[in-house]
Amino acid sequence: MRLRIQHTTTYRYEPAATSVIQILRMTPGSHDGQYVAEWQIDVSTDTKLDMHEDAFGNVTHVLSCGPVADIKISAEGLIETHDTGGVLRGADERFPSGLFLRSTELTTVNPAMASFARQLRSEAESDTLGFLHALMSEVSEHMTFDEDPTNSGTSAVEAFTLKRGVCQDYAHIFIACARTAGVPARFVSGHFLRSDGTVHQDAGHAWAEAFVPDLGWVGFDPANCICSTDAHVRVAIGLDYLGAAPVRGTRYGGGAETLSVTVKVEQAGRSGQWQSQSQG
């Protein structure tokens, strides 16, 4: 499938910020099942984008400028995808899978989550893949999609207790439960071609990858209760959302900050849909 993606983030500061530094993880990479045919990033201000790869191999750009009243960051390109049954191959793996057993503030568990994961793990016994499919289904059933009660700093425990949240929260709960059951798991940020053009959100899509012995990393999208498909475009990975966020940074000076994000995902040659983007 050929997917055309447009991702625009706009910051406005009133009064102007003295200086702004942003780290952008908005550029996808190529691997089996995903080929980046075209991609570019444009920034409205007169600034230099310094490109490098972070520790996990994500393509990052560092933006610094100021004083500035508004910044518009646009990423656009064409991605060719193929369905691999959710199995990731050909990616740049910098660390052993065991690193992704490491818990973070956003992916800790409470006793209820630990018990929830242990029960599923005991039912699946040595069948790691079966456990992960069951976990995805249970997380999807446990949660109700709701944009209001959570934000980018909401932990897995908080979202699990609320039983509500967006795709970022679903992914954090899945990751936390997988790790406490001894299965390495990590956060994935990216894009998703939706069949329902009426879905509007304030964040980009997110899902998880978990490590299965003799198979490797497999993508699980608990918000949609499916393994990753050719409708998913993988952009960045991290231990949690903070390590894979499309835009993350800081500013000095200035007053009120307004953020707006829009994403367009369409199958090339067909009409697509506009959706506001941030977590879901």
Image (cartoon, helix red, strand yellow):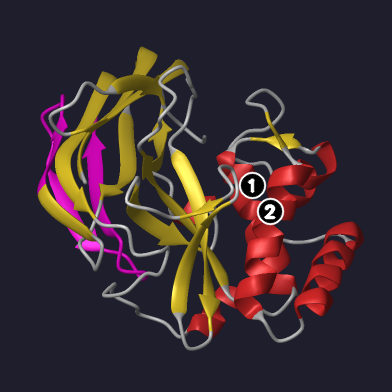
Vertical relation: 95 (above or below) 233:
below
Q: Is residue 116 visible?
A: yes
Dot 1 lies on which element? helix
Task: Please state if 182 lies on the left or on the right of 211 as rendered.
Answer: right
Q: Nearer the viewer, residue 162 or 22?
A: 162
**Mark 1 crowd level (few <14, some 14–19, many ≥20, 10 Å Cα):** many
Where on the picture, by quarter, is residue 273?
top left
Q: Nearer the viewer, mark 2 or mark 1?
A: 2
Res 250 → quadrant: top left
Mark 1 highlights which residue? 170
Magenta residues (range): 38-66
Q: Position of residue 60 (x, y in %)?
A: 26, 54
- Residue at 26% in and 75% down: 90
What percent of the width, then of the height, locates residue 76?
17, 35
According to the picture, the residue beneath numbered tag 2 turns out to be 137
Residue farthest along the top direction in this orientation = 14
Left or right: 137 as drawn, with respect to 245: right
- Left or right, residue 257 beside residue 163: left
Q: Find residue 78 and report its horizontal and vertical position in percent.
A: 14, 42
Q: Residue at x 63, y 63 (%)?
A: 133
Q: Residue at x 67, y 27 (%)?
A: 146
Q: Residue at x 40, y 20 (%)?
A: 197
Element type at marker 2?
A: helix
User: What is the x, y in percent for residue 55?
Assistant: 35, 71
Viewer can see residue 105 = no
Does 146 lie within the magenta span?
no
Amino acid type, mark 1: Tyr
Q: What amino acid is labelled 2 in the image?
A: Ser
